[in-house]
Amino acid sequence: MEIIQTHDKSLSKPPGGVLVWFIITLELLTFIAGIFFYFQYRSTHLSLFKEMQSKLNLDFAIWNTFFLITSGYFVALALNHLKNSKREDSRKKLMIGIFFGLGFIFLKSFEYYEKLSQGFDVRYNEFFTFYWFLTFFHYMHVVFATLILTFMYFKLKENSENEINALEIGGALWHMCDLIWILLFPTLFFIR
């Protein structure tokens, strides 16, 4: 009788590797802590926070949500195409994902310009201290992840040995940005 041994690699080695998921976990915990302190402080300054929330641009936030979620969808498609040996389709989907990521960066940059020109900087009040800390920290994650995806786009021109793993890392980081925004969006714009 022959014993067939199976090993589920998805449990022992998650996409992108354990270190990437350790970093993602730390980043998520950092944002969750920031959101926790936001709500703690908000509970003692409710009227200020409600008033300042009305100064935010909900239309921009909705568009930014669309940009990030759509981008994440195309990044996932790019990885799927790459795993199915469709390199050109993968590159096309990845470029669309990068394009929507750049849409987020452009619109968020414009929003920041608008807030600064209205005088709502990090020192304006407690609400905007949290707003800038949480959203700018997220913004920098999106910029970094977009650079990684752009690097991967050009790397996919070559036939690289670890390209699936590399795109899994980029995709995991990108989806972390999606998840963080899904937490920040209702926290800052809807919960009154």
Image: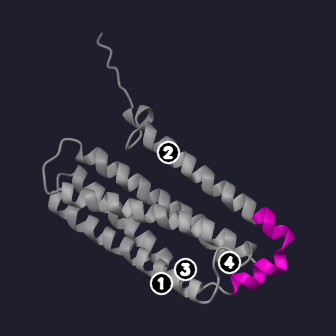
Say whether disc 1 or disc 2 marks the residue closer to the N-terminus: 2
Q: Assign a secondary structure to mark 4.
A: loop
Number of marks in picture: 4
Q: How far apart are marks 2 and 4 (CA)?
A: 29 Å
User: Label 3 belongs to which residue?
Assistant: 61
Q: Label 2, on which residue? A: 23
Give amino acid for label 4: Phe
List the single residue furthest toward the top. 1
Query: Around disc 4, counting alpha carbons within 10 Å, would you say few (fewer than 14), some (14 to 19), or many (20 or more)?
Result: few
Q: Mark 4 points at which residue?
A: 190
Find disc 1 in the rendering and name its residue.
110
- The residue type indicated by label 3 comes to Ala
| Magenta segment boundaries in residue numbering | 39-54
Q: Residues within 10 Å of mark 2 (few under 14, many from 20)?
A: few
Tell whether 85 sits left or right of 146. Answer: left
Q: Name the quarter where the C terminus is drawn.
A: bottom right
Q: Which residue is drawn at 33% across and 68% down?
A: 97
Marks 3 and 1, how far apart in space?
A: 12 Å
Whichever of callouts 2 and 3 sits on the residue coming sooner in the sequence is: 2
**Residue 124, percent across and down?**
70, 79
The Cα–Cα distance between marks 1 and 2, rounded to whole angstroms, is 29 Å
Task: Answer with the quarter of the image where residue 17 lies.
Answer: top left
Image quadrant in which the N terminus is located:
top left
Q: Distance between the residues labelled 2 and 3?
A: 26 Å
Q: In the displayed structure, does residue 167 sit left or right of residue 177?
A: left
Residue 43 on the magenta segment: yes
Q: What label does residue 157 carry, if any?
A: none
- Pointers 2 and 3 in contact (CB under 8 A)? no
130 lies left or right of 167? right
Q: Is residue 133 visible?
A: yes
Residue placed most toward the observer, 43 or 71: 43
Closer mark to the observer between disc 3 and disc 1: 1
